[in-house]
Image (cartoon, rainbow, N blue to C red):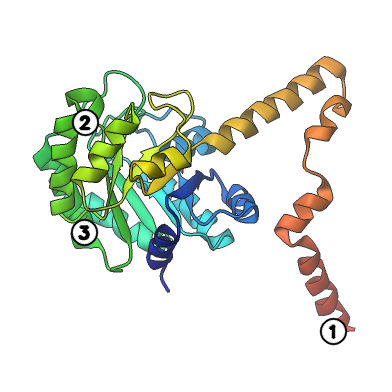
Amino acid sequence: MSAGYRFRQALARHQPLPIVGTVNAYSAMLAERAGHDAIYLSGGGVANASFGLPDLGVTTLNDVAEDARRITAACELPLLVDIDTGFGGAFSIARCIAEMERAGVAAVHIEDQVPQKRCGHRPNKEIVSSEEMVDRIKACVDARKDDGFFIMARTDAFAQEGLQAALDRAAACVEAGADGIFAEAVHTLDDYRAFTKALNVPVLANITEFGQTPLFNQRELAEVGVAMVLYPLSAFRAMSQAALAVYQSIVDNGDQKAVVERMQTREELYDVLGYHDYEAKLDALFNAKK
């Protein structure tokens, strides 16, 4: 069964489906260990964690595809990937979809910002026309080889043009073949209810910290019909704060003793990685040569 169909199965099992951000392969393994059924690679996460850059459309298709390949090689959970604006025109979008399918990705979302995009929760975003966004969705759908591969349209129109314009744009994307809608920077549960009532496809709520959307609980979102709840960089933010605390403690104290209790132990790391199974295989191989 393809990754796309496994994503659709996870979506059918959950009301709503939590999708957690994983900035690298090991994070994905930890999400799987915790019991999640779907994971996410953020474009902002690729820029921030892999390149030390802001989320301003600086990274490329190859950058995102490489991080996606590393995650899908290490983890069986279906992976949703942020492909920003598609990395170019129709042919570039088609190539992007092909690369994502080859990388074992389950789903993507493509947005309606201009190519020089900004984080969805920042001011002064600019969006393309509804017609251009529809063309982006059509290019995705036309390029798809696996029918299970899930194509989601993200709209940033809510912040720029209001609820009705965002609903109209989302409906046009669904008509063009989008399997789901990502309504970005929405403010209230009533706004989400408006999306889910107007559309006949699953709707995603982006519950990112320190942004425009309150941190609604999954139960609240389920009550208004939201099908997917995204936590794009929650773990990355926690990891970064913990790392900074460790680095600072070493500077301040001359050792790491004050922060050892915050750390994952060596045995816990080995357990996640299956280290001892690898070691046993090595022993068996070397013993066989004797």
**Residue 16: image location, x then y, percent:** 42, 49
In percent of the image, x 41 and y 65: which residue is there?
A: 9
Q: Which residue is mark 3?
A: 141
Q: Compare residues 85 and 290 and report the one nearer the observer.
A: 85
Left or right placement of residue 219 versus residue 249 in this view? left
Examine the rendering and report whether any part of residue 194 can be seen.
yes
For the residues labelled 1 and 3, the Cα–Cα distance comes to 52 Å
Vertical side of 207 occupied by 32: above or below: below
In percent of the image, x 41 and y 70: which residue is there?
A: 2
| Residue located farthest toward the front when viewing the structure as drawn | 223
Q: Are marks 1 and 3 in contact (CB under 8 Å)?
A: no
**Residue 217: image location, x then y, percent:** 48, 36
The 10 Å Cα crowd at callout 1, few under 14, some 14 to 19, many 20 or more, is few
Q: Which mark is residue 118?
A: none
In percent of the image, x 20 and y 48: which residue is there?
A: 199
Q: Which mark is residue 288?
A: 1
Identify the secondary structure beneath mark 2. helix
